[in-house]
Image (cartoon, helix red, strand yellow):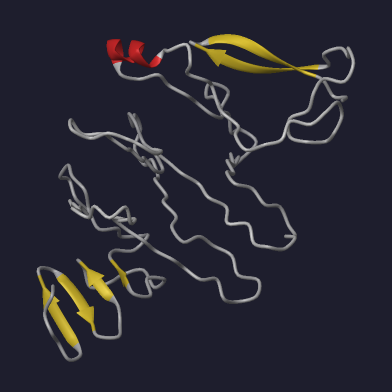
Amino acid sequence: MGQNVSNYGKQGGAKWFVGGTINLGEETYESVGLFGGGGTTAAPLPTAVTGNFLDFRTTSTNADSADVRGIYWKHLFSGAGASGETIRAYSSIEAAGAQSVNGCHFTVGVGTSGTITGQASATRHTFLAPAKVLGGTNVLISCDIWAESASSNMRHGPIIRFNMAGGASRAALLDDNLALFSIDGVTVGGAAHGNIVDAISGDKAVTHLARIRINNVAYYLMLRNAV
């Protein structure tokens, strides 16, 4: 686009209005698209071509240790009772036999000459806790399974999956120092102290088992309902 217009512009099948809505493709767009959009729920923008609807390939040569981001979007919830998300991705499977579909897929890679001196994460979540007591339920990571009906059934899928991928190359990942998960920055309390991690208080029996699968074999974590 990149063209100066007074009230209305059109280029390459896209329409936009100064101070209005960028409309991609057809004449109609979803009414909730306040700034930009294309297609509607009933008539989405179609394509039969393999590819990405939006595709940016960018690079940064900045070397001063300051953060450089591909996309940064800060959305302020300024009304009482507000709810929502800064970004929400919704992938809907509409045809039988879909092979692999994800709501979001994040990848961090390291090039041939690249090295890491700090931390690299495929996904990083930060809850910015303010200097006050918060009400409500505050969760760093929330995973919800929504049952649409009484016939909903996900018995063949784990809630959380860790997959050592990479074919034969995955053997390099299976080092003795690799842990299932890591909890850092906590204070280990004494017996029944009430911390996230406490010492064992007495010899109490196991009361519950939580099933996990390792290489599709069921194992059970031992739990007890008393400290």
Kindly indicate the quadrant of the structure image that contains residue 51.
top left
Residue under the point 39% across and 43% down: 104
Task: Name which quarter of the figure residue 82 lies in.
Answer: bottom right
Q: Is residue 61 above or below residue 169?
A: below
Along the line of sight, the residue nearer the viewer: 81 or 132: 132
The answer to whether 181 appears left or right of 175 in the picture is right
Question: Residue drawn at (43%, 41%), measured in percent from left and top?
Answer: 123
Residue 56 is at least partly visible in this image? no
Percent x, y of residue 102: 39, 38
Q: Is 78 situated left or right of 58 in this image?
A: right
> Residue placed at 27% from the left, 34% from the top?
115
The C terminus is located in which quarter?
A: top right
Q: Residue furthest top?
A: 217
The one nearer the camera, 123 or 3, is: 123
Residue lying at the far bottom of the rendered structure: 6
Q: Position of residue 207 (x, y in %)?
A: 83, 16
From where the camera sits, is residue 141 visible? yes
Horizontal side, residue 220 vs residue 158: left or right? right
Name the spot of residue 5 as percent of width and height, x first: 14, 87
Task: Say above or below: 214 vs 149.
Answer: above
Q: Quadrant of residue 30?
A: bottom left
Q: Nearer the viewer, residue 48 or 210?
A: 210
Location of the N terminus by quadrant is: bottom left
Relative image position of residue 193 (x, y in whole percent): 85, 33
Q: How many marks?
A: 0
Q: Measuring 41% from the left and 12% from the top, which residue is drawn there?
A: 174
Say if 137 sits above or below 149 in the image: below
Left or right of 105 on screen, residue 24: left
